[in-house]
Amino acid sequence: MATAIYQSTIQSLPLVARGKVRDMYAVGEDHFLIVATDRISAFDVILDDPIPGKGQVLTEMTNFWLKKLAHIVPNHSSDMRLEDVLSGEELAQAQGRSVIVKRLQPILVEAVARGYIIGSGWKDYRSTGEICGVKLPRGLQLAEKLEQPIFTPAAKAEVGDHDINVDFNHVVAEVGQEMAEEIRDVTLKLYTTAAEYAETKGVVIADTKFEFGLDKAGRLHLMDEVLTPDSSRFWPANRIQKGVNPPSYDKQFVRDWLEQQDWDKTPPAPRLPQEVIDKTAAKYREALVILTGQSI
């Protein structure tokens, strides 16, 4: 497997930002180059150890889902090719893990859809009986399927900070009633459509988060990563048991290992053993193959 890329080094374009995983460069005034590195974050902390091939998996999966879901909402895809703006070593570095996208005005809300109760949603439910202001029936168990998928937004945090679960009224305050309703409805439609497809592949999408932006005309667009192992919980459908944290095709393997360490979830994180790195890389590749039929 190719050497892992922890941080991209594109010199020919202005660097705009480095996120938890992606490096963003300006391409003129209307586009961005987004490079998916092999960095991995857990509990909103960027780990020191990259996962080889991870950025390629994220890019391939996002491209797959953008095409499959394009009938629901416009997205950030553009017609520009990497070869149009990069060459030589920079092109080789970006190949397979990068896209050139439309420049959009980001909406600073994580649009989360949940079909099962797990993670921070489970913790909130146990303490309040609700997730993000959505009241749920009593007696639900860990990893139980909800009667209907729910929209549970989060306030997007700065790098290094924890995203905060919020209610629908927070979204209304951020973007207005009409746009908030559109984001909620589109989020649930995207999730439901993707979940139905994934079930045909023997995979349950327990939850996922989407990010949206506006074009110059104010139209909602899907952007950033879409239905990847970083932004979603993918479970093998035949391994789900209520009351038990299911195995997954995502970074839950890393989270579970970190939970067993003496660590307070603030930087720096513990260094990952090679076994954890290798198994995590394999899980990402497995998710790509099962859901898309592609490989890296």
Image (tube, helix red, strand yellow):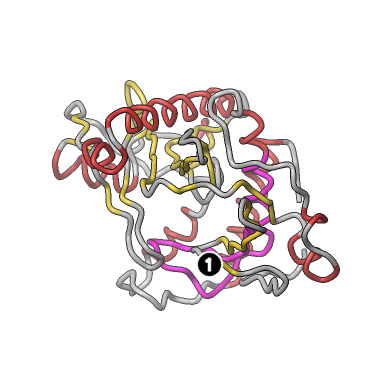
Residue 138 left/right relative to 172: left
Location of residue 111 by image quarter: top left
Residue 78 left/right relative to 178: right
Location of residue 71 by image quarter: top right
What's the residue type where badge 1 is placed? Arg
- In the rendered image, residue 132, in percent from the top left (x then y), is placed at 23, 39
- In the rendered image, residue 42, in percent from the top left (x then y), is placed at 43, 62
Residue bounds of the magenta highlight: 34-63
Q: Which residue is at 45% across, 40% downward?
A: 208
Whether residue 116 appears in magenta in the rendering, the answer is no
Quarter placement of the N terminus: bottom right
According to the picture, the residue beneath numbered tag 1 turns out to be 18
Residue farthest toward the right in the current orientation of the protein: 88
- In the rendered image, residue 256, in percent from the top left (x then y), is placed at 42, 58
Q: Is residue 18 above or below residue 244?
A: below
- In the rendered image, residue 145, in percent from the top left (x then y), is placed at 36, 28
Whether residue 55 appears in magenta in the rendering, the answer is yes
Mark 1 nearby-residue class (10 Å; few <14, some 14–19, many ≥20): some
Given residues 89 and 141, the one toward you in this image is 89
Residue farthest toward the left in the current orientation of the protein: 128
